[in-house]
Amino acid sequence: MKLFTDESGQTIVVAAVFMSLVALGFLAFALDTGSLIQQKRMAQGAADAAALAAAEELTAGDPTNEQTAANAVSKLNGFDTTLATNPAVVTLSTPASGNYTGSAYIQATVSKPIPTMFLSAFRSSWATMQVSATSIAGGAQVSQTCVCLQGTSGQDLYMSNGSKINASTCGIVENSGSSNAIGIVGATLTALILGTVSTDWDNSSNVNNGGTTGTTTIVQGITDTCAGSPPAAPSYSSCVGDPGGSGGTYSFGPASASSVICYTGLTIGANSSIDTLKPGIYVISNGYLTFDTGSGGHSNLGGQGVFFYLTGTASLTIQSGANVNLVSGGATESGGGTAPTVGIYNGVVIYQAASDTQAMTIDGGSTSFINGGIYASGAAVTLNNGSGATVEGGIDVATLNMSGGGTLTPTADINDGNLSTGVAKLMQ
């Protein structure tokens, strides 16, 4: 009778049954998890395809077809929006934050409830699991480039403490490949497009302390080159010393708008002098081109139809309190009319030779109106506290540093190239 009353070994049987159930649970979990992971991968592929398809429609100028195209390619990738049971949903939107904001980008989110095989046995709410994925693609957008920063490494554009760039009608190109190529700290940058060669620049860490790029479309990894095509350097022979005087009335410049004069340096508006700039071609060799406060609220009189070529170690300084007005050859004067032409230099006001790497400085409290392009591909340009510069033309420099309320308002002209976001492509 002991055979029937002995309970030894029952624990082993119970344990075996329990372990079998646990193993079955893990198997069910593994099978359903594997299926969901596979569906997640498919959802990501569908989201990538949907974002690209919508961006291509945007590029083609047919935004009304974006949703149809996105739904169609999502179906091809296993996420069908027309199913009667558990249909997929494809949602298109404009990214609201991150590096890729603005109307040139489309965010596609693909989602679908996926039935599970075993998990519902453990919890009814697990009978279906929602799987989703999101992608962002960029459509093509084109603008003229009005600011070109040619430094290839490090930080080429730094804005701080209330400074502003107002380039609302044109684009800015940054040629540095560094992760900190652009820094906007408590400052405002507005442009149609901000394009950077860098592929790992992150506006979340480089735009801070109240800094903003507003609605500017940001494009990373561009291949466009923004270097302008300045005219050939003027020919000149001997140079004369700085004729700038102090406290008097002076007139500077060549004999005619088609002729050239070379100065070893030129100081305009020193010690309340009244200085008039004649139209023509100015060469500054190895010295400073300096604008001081002048008299009667003007650093210079005249200045219509002028072209300055800086070479050797020459550099430009616009001092605190200066009020500078320069108009390129053939351009519209601020008071109306057309400035005298200067031949191949029409449309350009300042051209610093590429081999001349001396810095340009616009000091605090100065005001500059420059109707024409500035080419100084080797120069670091600083726009200091409270200074304002309106440049009706392209700016092509190595680096630009702005601070303390300094404001730059550039516009594009016919000498500037185009910046394009290119064909539709995945961004993230």
Image (cartoon, rainbow, N blue to C red):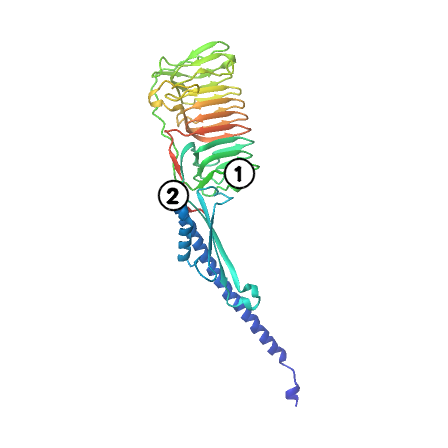
Q: Which residue extends farthest bottom? A: 1
Residue 163 located left or right of residue 426: right
Report the front residue among 325 and 27.
Answer: 325
Instruction: Give the structural element (helix, strand or loop) at label 1.
Output: strand
Q: Position of residue 106 (x, y in %)?
A: 45, 46
Residue 358 appears in view: no
Residue 24 quadrant: bottom right
Task: Please name whichever residue, 419 or 198, is drawn nearer the observer in this view of the structure.
Answer: 419
Q: Mark 1 highlights which residue?
A: 207
* Residue 213 point in image, percent of width and height: 50, 37
Q: Name the residue that disc number 2 marks.
A: 61
Which element is circle 2 on? loop
Q: Earlier in the sequence, mark 1 or mark 2?
A: 2
- Residue 25 position in % (x across, y down): 55, 69
Residue 91 appears in the rendering: yes
Disc 1 marks which amino acid?
Val
To which quarter of the image does residue 13 belong? bottom right
Amino acid of disc 2: Gly
Say whether marks 1 and 2 touch (CB < 8 Å): no
| Residue 168 position (above or below residue 238) | below
